[in-house]
Image (cartoon, rainbow, N blue to C red):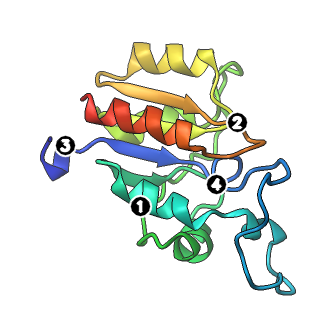
Amino acid sequence: MPGAANRPLLFLDVDGPLLPFGMPAAPQRSAAPPQPGVNPLLARLDPEHGRALSRLPCDLVWATTWMDEANKVIAPRLGLPELPVVTWPDEDDADIRLHWKTRGLVGWAAGRSFVWVDDEITEADRDWVSAHHPGPALLHRVDARTGLTAADFAVVGRWLTGL
């Protein structure tokens, strides 16, 4: 296992992976009714995701448009500590084939191995990361209709333990 400074990163998106857009297959896990002014999609958060993410041998980083709100709203509901947050650049990427997060995540990783979990990853992103990032990287696309599944955690876990 690499030292703490060299542990792989896991860049985590919220909308799609943690807050699926499709209708949940199982009853909502939240026992409390939705509160006025609270995003009703938060009831779709699965507390087991927090436990599963915490067990992975990596450093978790929010890579989401939720920015610091992920630490205030999402992390407590998942039982996660406050996590680092990627700050996104203001300028648009000239290469429209790339996801707007791709270059920023590679820069943030600064050569460290990383996993990126998102519902909008494409082959163009994988190709660009392969050509521009010196370390190992797994860009794992999650189905936004279902969010993270046991199969997704298995893929990510195998990749991380194989480093």
Residue beneath disc 2: 143
Q: CA distance from mark 3 to mark 4?
A: 26 Å
- Residue 102: x and y in percent read 54, 32
Label 1 sits on what residue type?
A: Pro
Give the SS element for disc 1: loop
Kindly identify the residue that appears in the image at 84 percent across and 83 percent down. 37
Residue ID for mark 1 = 84
Please rate how many residues cluster around mark 4, counting C-alpha atoms within 10 Å: few if below 14, some from 14 to 19, many from 20: many
Could you say whether the residue bearing mark 2 is in a helix, strand or loop?
loop
Is the C terminus in the top left, top right, bottom left or bottom right quadrant? top left
Q: Amino acid at mark 2?
A: Asp
Is residue 121 shown left or right of residue 80?
right
Label 4: which secondary element: loop
Mark 3 vs mark 4: give the one in front. Answer: 4
Q: Please tell me which residue lies in front, 28 or 148.
A: 28
Residue 6 numbered mark, or none: 3
Rendered location of residue 145, percent (x, y):
78, 42
At label 3, the amino acid type is Asn
Question: Where in the figure is residue 59, as x and y percent of width and height?
Answer: 33, 52
Compute the Cα span from label 4 to label 1. 17 Å
